[in-house]
Amino acid sequence: MSLRRPALGLAAFALSGLLLAGCAGGSSAPETEAPEGDAPAVTADEELHALLPADAQEDGVVVGTEAFYPPYEYLDADGSTVIGLDIDLLDAVTARLGISYTLENVAFDTLLPSLDGARYDIVVAGMTDTVERQANYDFVDYFNADQAIIVASGNPEGISTIADLCGQTVAVLVDSTQQEILSEADCDEPIDILTQPTDNDALLQVQSGRAVATLTQEATGRYNASQIGGGSAFEVANTESIDPRPLGYVFQKDSELVEAFQAALQSLVDDGTYAEILAGYELDAAALETITVNGAEQ
C-alpha cells in the first residue's frame, strides 16, 4: 500500500450557529462526559504487527471521522479532543498492532470520497456495513447497531414505528443508512426526508417543529435523549427493534490493512478488552463475539 500522507491535524468542523437548549456554549453538540475509569492496558503483538504492510508498520495510519455522533465519537470539554467508544476501541486496536494513528475530524458526507482519494487509510465513524457499500469498500465489523426514532418529549404525534412516519417530515443525517431506511419505507404517502449535515442538526429540526422525528442509531439516540436539556427535551419513541445492522471500520477495497485490523480486534474480544470498553458505555448488549469482514447481508 502506498498512500501519500499530507500534513494532518484535527480539522475544525464548521458548525451552524444554532444551539440546542442544554448544550455546551459555542457548540451544537450536547455537553457530554467520557466514562469514568482508566482505559484497559493493551500490549502490542508482534505477530499481528507483522500482518501490516510496511508503510503502516513504520508510519501508522490516517483515520477519518466525524466527531458529532456520541457515544461513538464526540468532542471533549476542550472542544477539540475527539473521544468516545470508537476512539477507545481505535486506541486499543492500534496499541495491539503496535502502531500510531492520526485522526481527522470532517463532515460525514466527505468521509468515503476522501477514503476513495487515499486521504485516509481507514474511516472510523459509526458507519453501517451494507451490501451496497461492500461493492466499493471492505468493512471490519465491530458492533451491532439498532435504530431509534427520536421525538420531542411527550411524543405528541404518538409515533412508535417507521409506519407512523409515513406522510410526515423526518430529519436525518445526510448520506446515512437511516436516510436509506426512510426512503425505502413501505408507505402509501412517502416520508418527507429532511437531510442534515450532522445528527445534532437533525435534532434541531425536531426541537424547532420542522420535523416530527429523527431516525438515528439507537446508541446515539438514547445518548442524546438522556443528555440534551437534562434529558427532558427528547425521547426514544420505538419500543421494538428496528433493522439492526453491523457497524464497521471502512477500508478501500482489498486493502492490506483489513486482515491485521480484523485479527487485532478479535484478539481484543478474546482477552476481554473489547467487552470492558463497551461496558464503559453500557453497550454490552450490542457486542459481537466474532469480528467479521463484510458481515452485512441482504
Image (cartoon, rainbow, N blue to C red):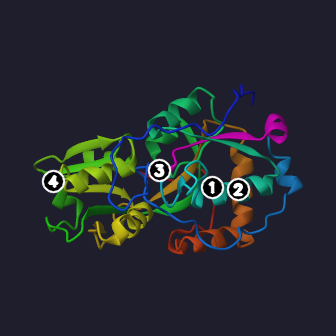
What label does residue 91 carry, if any?
Answer: 2
Q: Residue furthest front?
A: 25
Q: Is residue 57 left or right of residue 72?
A: right
Q: Which residue is mark 1?
A: 87
Q: Earlier in the sequence, mark 3 or mark 4?
A: 3
Rounded to the nearest angstrom, the CA distance separating label 1 from label 2 is 6 Å
Do tag 3 and tag 1 residues touch (Cβ < 8 Å)?
A: no
- For mark 4, what is the residue? 166
Q: Residues within 10 Å of mark 3 (few under 14, many from 20)?
A: many
Labels 4 and 2: the sequence-earlier one? 2
Q: Earlier in the sequence, mark 3 or mark 2?
A: 3
Task: Decide whether residue 295 is among the magenta residues.
Answer: no
| Front position in the image: 281 or 136 | 281
For the magenta stretch, what is the residue range?
A: 53-67
- Residue at (75% x, 31% y) in the render: 1
Q: Position of residue 259 (x, y in %)?
A: 72, 48
Q: Quadrant of residue 93?
A: bottom right
Sequence-wise first label, 3 or 1: 3
